Image (cartoon, rainbow, N blue to C red):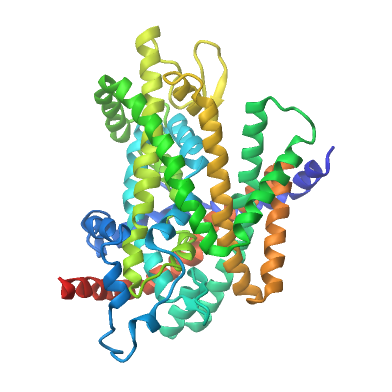
Amino acid sequence: MSVGQKIDRSFQPFADVWESLVLYPITLGGYEIPIILILLVSGATFFTVYFGVPGITKLPLSLNTVRGKYDDLERNYRDPENPDVIPDEAKGGEVSHFQALATAVSGTVGLGNIAGVAVAIALGGPGATFWMIICGLLGMSTKFVECTLGVKYRDIEDDGTVHGGPMYYLSRGLTDLKKGRLGQFLGGLFAVLCVGASFGGGNAFQSNQAASQLSSLMGINFQTNGFYIGIALAVLVAIVIIGGIKRIANITEKIVPFMAGVYVLASLIILGAHYDYIDDALGLILEGAFTPMAGLGGLVGVLIVGFQRAAFSNEAGAGSAAIAHAAVKTKFPASEGVVALLEPLIDTVIVCTMTALVIIFFNIDGGLKNVESIFTYGGDGSGNVTLKATGESVGGVELTTMAYDAVIPHFSYVLTVAIILFAFSTMISWSYYGLQSWKYLFGRSKAADLTYKLLFLVFIVIGASTTLNAVVKFSDAMILALVFPNMIGLFFLYPKVKLELKRYTNAIKSQM
């Protein structure tokens, strides 16, 4: 038994207990629904109603802001309450709106869009797609709230270095509301959970999947190949993260559009090749969403699957993205809030939906050619489906790969490259999230900075060279656990967001 296997086995009880706590359910109408999912959905629904469906009404403002239409306003604006402050002296932040968006998107777009969607379709059928889209639209409101607060309560040093995120708006924002002790507790809890999540779900899991895919593509079966791949990944990540958020932003603004563009283009090619299936697919999605087929657990079961996979994918409510958005160059917190609402739109509504449609088309196509479909929705109940022709059980990345390869031969090679790029961009984004949380806990010294980065690089090698399922399971659950301190804070602080939104829109109107 290897050292990695020993660690995994000894850590398994802790992982099981932690996951059961994070996903602790309550029973409603015969269904066990995780409390964390209720918190996410109820919060997102409330914010959507309170802010007047910002995912739709503020979308033009969001697009104009991210493309730089109001950059001059933000550079030259003088606060009426502080008219003596010269614009240049008031300048803060390190990255542009687009760079902040790219960095945050790189932390969410990844294996969840490829493997996670396949799991949702396998478990919940086509109807799960509808609820993923609804969850993505609702998540846009949550992202708007948390990222506005991330900028409002950030801390900017004299040299322009920015420190921000939920740990700051929880501690500072709640202190403003005379709830300082609660704020300090929630901020500290978030930081601890975020550090753990950065080492596991945001790092070790990513390097493990990248190493696995690369080994499979190249046919490498050496016992130590994962270790050497991990070393190579660690070197590449080190080159990027040593430069801080500016270098991370410069890399992600190039990688994210490229990899997302390739994936979306391939999806559009498949949708175009089978455009006559679109009405059939939409029919299956709507039918499955409201009148699910037998064996899928009923309407609520399909809804839970769709919402849960979407929540895992876009991380709206977890607050992690607010750390990246806090570094933006702006004097208006709400300007970054409206930019952030594009994340769930890109991640869930567009990319996840395309993956789902390709898989549904794949099953329809098989049905038309072979009289019956390739697999039955519902699968084995654990995220896999059974192929009728061979009896083989497939799921996750493998199912998605089969669906794309069926129309674009050998696309699996491109998909492997995409997975590696997704993993790489996720790692560098989460290194920043973890570092900011580490500094919140241990101070902003160079020693603290170096210590965290070295530990992060070590976990890349560990993740790539061993199969630490329990450790990663534990750390991945930490990402979901971030929802508890973050959403509690958002319920107290959301009125501040409305004031910031009014301030931003009034400034735009005054310049027109």
Q: Is residue 396 visible?
A: no
Q: Residue furthest left?
A: 512
Q: In the picture, which quadrant includes the C terminus?
A: bottom left
Please report the residue visible at 49 percent of the width from the left and 60 percent of the height from the top.
320
Image quarter of residue 63:
bottom left
Q: In the picture, which quadrant includes the N terminus?
A: top right
Q: Residue furthest right?
A: 1
Q: Is residue 195 visible?
A: yes
Please report the residue visible at 52 percent of the width from the left and 82 percent of the height from the top.
158
Determine whether 339 is above or below 511 in the image.
Answer: above
Image quarter of residue 467:
top right
- The location of residue 473, given as percent across then percent down, is 63, 47
- The location of residue 140, given as percent across then percent down, is 34, 55
Of 216 and 259, which appears nearest the observer? 259
Determine whether 226 is above or below 270 in the image.
Answer: below
Determine whether 103 is above or below 233 in the image.
Answer: below
How many marks on residues? Answer: 0
Determine whether 38 is above or below 213 in the image.
Answer: below
- The location of residue 396, given as percent across then percent down, is 53, 32
Of 131 and 324, which appears nearest the observer? 324
Residue 54 is left or right of residue 44, and the answer is left
Of 236 and 443, which appears nearest the observer? 236
Please report the residue visible at 39 percent of the width from the left and 78 percent of the height from the top.
91
Please report the residue visible at 63 percent of the width from the left and 61 percent of the height from the top.
242
